[in-house]
Amino acid sequence: MTAAGRKIRVLVVDDSALIRSVLARLIDRQPDMECVGTAGDPLIAREMIRRLDPDVLTLDVEMPRMDGLDFLGRLMRLRPMPVVMVSTLTERGAEVTMQALELGAVDFVAKPRIGVADGLQGLSDEIADKLRIAARARLRRPRAIAPADPAPAGQAGAQLPHPPVRRLLTTEKVVFIGASTGGTEATREVLVNLPPDAPAILITQHMPPGFTASYAARLNSLCRIAVKEAVDGERVLPGHAYIAPGGLHLSVERSGANYLARVAEGEPVNRHRPSVEVLFRSAARVVGANAIGIMLTGMGADGARAMKEMRDAGSWNIAQDEASCVIFGMPREAIAHGAAHEVLPLSSIARRLIECARAASGTPDARTRAATG
């Protein structure tokens, strides 16, 4: 239900009549939502939005008559509203989905390449949950995306090598980031504002298989640090960020003087795989006082208890504030558990992270001086 107590009104936009029918039935089976209409292309959808005033839109990635991204960009400029993308699980679909999230889409659903109708039925709970979350999401104004360094003449779109790390801020600090709904863009804002000699960063973003490779590659092209999908057993290095592969848990392990990334299947934790709880618990156990924990926007409570374990082990923890979150669930739960030392707007988190990493000592007193001085 909406805040006013009425059902969530959903408009389905997809060029496939079968998909439109499946999604409409799925939505109408939910007690708190209704499908108010379906559209086969963005031009029809534009008129239906004006007439029906839906609360949430589902939007196919590839659409006739007008590209889905073009339509989404215009929609967010002229009539901002929550949008959940319906994305095909292909390399091209993943790339377009990442662009859609940059343009302001709240979330996405990955539809299978074969047996789409049956596959969507099997995702009914996930789709309904994402529509409910989108209906109460705080919409953000999309930001211009530009690479950290311009490409040389004649190499437009080329990915530049990351500058060498000459002076490391620290060889000990490791940053741990957890995020869910709205987190792809929140994480991007943190990472693009970090210098190339930033501490090592491990990230768990709730995301299904097939999308994290495109997400990591896109971030890598925008950031001054190197960004990649984590690989099991690889050394965790300063100036690098490692993203949990979709559908797999990420944790950290120590081998002598080195930290290693561990990637494994395992059972879902808090209904998630990857789970922030798994990553943060390993941070508390392995990294302790040399960890910096960051909880970004997302629905639910995944990672809140483990973040408190990190604090008890001596880490310095930051939660994103409500005003800058798309969904304030995960940061709110971390705060409620007493896990956060600071609650900051998204625009301040990268700067504070570096201030904490530059602290002269790894002791709690030194971190307090770095965070308050």
Image (cartoon, rainbow, N blue to C red):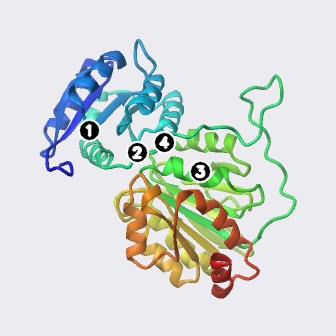
Measure how far apart labels 4 and 3 are at the Cα level. Answer: 13 Å
Q: Residues within 10 Å of mark 1 (few under 14, many from 20)?
A: many
Identify whether 209 is placed above or below 269: above
Residue 237 percent location from the top left of the image: 73, 61
Q: Secondary structure at mark 4?
A: loop
Measure how far apart labels 1 and 3 are at the Cα level. Answer: 27 Å
Measure how far apart labels 4 and 2 are at the Cα level. Answer: 7 Å
For the residues bearing labels 4 and 2, Cβ distance under 8 angstroms: yes
Residue drawn 81% across the image and 65% down it? 168
Q: Is residue 71 visible?
A: yes
Type of the residue with mark 4: Arg
- Of label 3 and label 2, which has the lower sequence position? 2
**Left of 74 or right of it: where is 20?**
left
Q: Furthest-right residue in view?
A: 166
Residue drawn 35% across the image and 49% down it? 137
For the residues bearing labels 4 and 3, Cβ distance under 8 angstroms: no
Type of the residue with mark 1: Asp
Q: Residues within 10 Å of mark 4 (few under 14, many from 20)?
A: few
Q: Residues within 10 Å of mark 2 (few under 14, many from 20)?
A: many
Residue of label 2: 139
Of circles 1 and 4, which is in front?
A: 4
- Of label 1 and label 2, which has the lower sequence position? 1
Residue of label 4: 141
- Of label 4 and label 3, which has the lower sequence position? 4
Of circles 4 and 3, which is in front?
A: 4
Measure how far apart labels 1 and 4 are at the Cα level. Answer: 18 Å
